[in-house]
Amino acid sequence: MFNTFIWDFDGTLFNTYPMIVQGYMLALKDYGIESSKEEIYRLLKEYSSAAIAKKFQVDFTELSDNAKLHEEKSTYLPKSFSGAKKVLQAVVRKQKRNIILTHRKQDSTQLLLEKEQLDDLISEIVGPENEFPRKPDPTALQYLLDKYSLDPKKTVMIGDRALDVDAGKNAGVHTLFFDNENLLHNIQADHRVTTMQEIERFV
């Protein structure tokens, strides 16, 4: 059905949220701000990390950088969601393309992929080093459409948050919302799945 699969990373391919939530809680604690796992997780899922900075009235860049430093010290080892490797392999087997578009640094993303031998299944990782505006801005997706001469009708953006879906819509590609917790019901994506296995039918 689609020829190019553009994946969000955190919360879509890998369950990194426990590590991310802890990182932001510790970063807020550096400011003397107490928060709960539930509150941080809700803000991340429903909005973005920028919403955390806004709510607690701290500088976003500084908070984000500090959270990442705490993440790097975490002993939690994120793992890919069940079925992720299989669907990535199915895409490559049919000579189609997997690309990652993430707010996570490229080296961190690459390291996690390598730990599960998934790196060879990915054509490119677009991260903050590319210096594109953050999702839902479509600039990064437009770069990929141009670079690989992609047909928007045969390209899908896959993510677990509204900003992923909105980025896809803004770029004119198809959108697939991965809602493994059946948590968010107001996301207007073209397609919605709750498991990785369901994504195989789009390959």
Image: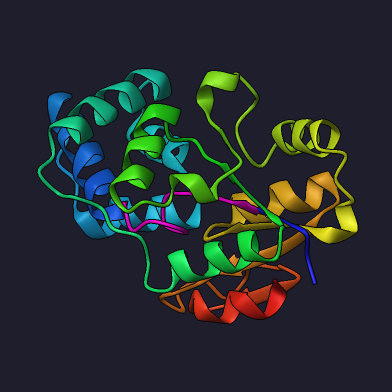
**Frontmost residue, 53 versus 97:** 97
Residue found at x 55% / y 46%: 122
Q: Is residue 164 magenta?
A: no
Q: Reply above or below: 118 against 107.
A: below
42 left or right, relative to 2: left
Residue found at x 74% / y 39%: 141
Q: Position of residue 118 (x, y in %)?
A: 42, 52
In the picture, residue 159 is in which quadrant? bottom right
**Frontmost residue, 161 versus 191:** 191
Q: Reply above or below: 61 against 80.
A: above
Q: Position of residue 125 (x, y in %)?
A: 55, 36
Q: Position of residue 195 (x, y in %)?
A: 48, 78
48 left or right, relative to 173: left
Magenta part of the protein: which range? 6-16
Q: Is residue 10 magenta?
A: yes
Residue found at x 42% / y 39%: 49
Q: Quadrant of the N terminus?
A: bottom right
In the picture, residue 105 is in which quadrant? top left
169 left or right, relative to 128: right
Q: Main secondary structure of the magenta part?
A: loop
Please name the colour scheme applied to the rendered image. rainbow
Q: Position of residue 198 (x, y in %)?
A: 57, 81
**Frontmost residue, 135 versus 174:** 174
Count of numbered marks? 0
7 left or right, relative to 181: right
Q: Quadrant of the C terminus?
A: bottom right
